[in-house]
Amino acid sequence: MTKNKKYTTDVLEIMYRRYYEGKPERLAQLEKARAEDELERKIYQLREEATEMRRKK
């Protein structure tokens, strides 16, 4: 019996299969990192806007 494997050259899909597929703890860590990244980007944006406003005065 041979298994038909689905081959891909998509690097994101390869990485997902290798590091996240079937690993709920890793998926939870990924979601947490994404949420933290989103928050950090918003803080950065607000700080940049505040700096810009101070420069205009």
Image (cartoon, helix red, strand yellow):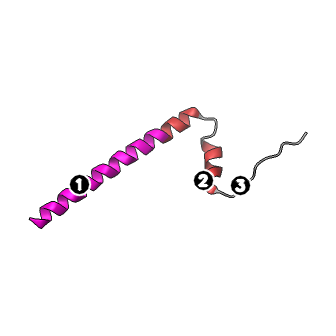
Residue 51, position in %: x, y? 18, 60
Find residue 12 and name its label.
2
Find residue 8 and name its label.
3
Residue 13, position in %: x, y? 63, 51
Report, in whole angstroms, how far the alpha carbon at label 2 lies from the one at label 3: 10 Å
At 54% from the left and 33% from the top, the residue drawn is 25
Contact, mark 1 vs mark 2 (Cβ under 8 Å): no
Please tell me which of labels 1 and 2 falls first in the chain.
2
At label 3, the amino acid type is: Thr
Q: Quadrant of the C terminus?
A: bottom left
SS class of the residue under badge 2?
helix
Q: Which residue is mark 1?
A: 47
Please tell me which of labels 1 and 3 falls first in the chain.
3
> Which segment did they paint magenta?
31-57
Question: Is residue 7 left or right of 20 when viewed as pictured?
Answer: right
Question: Is residue 49 left or right of 39 when viewed as pictured?
Answer: left
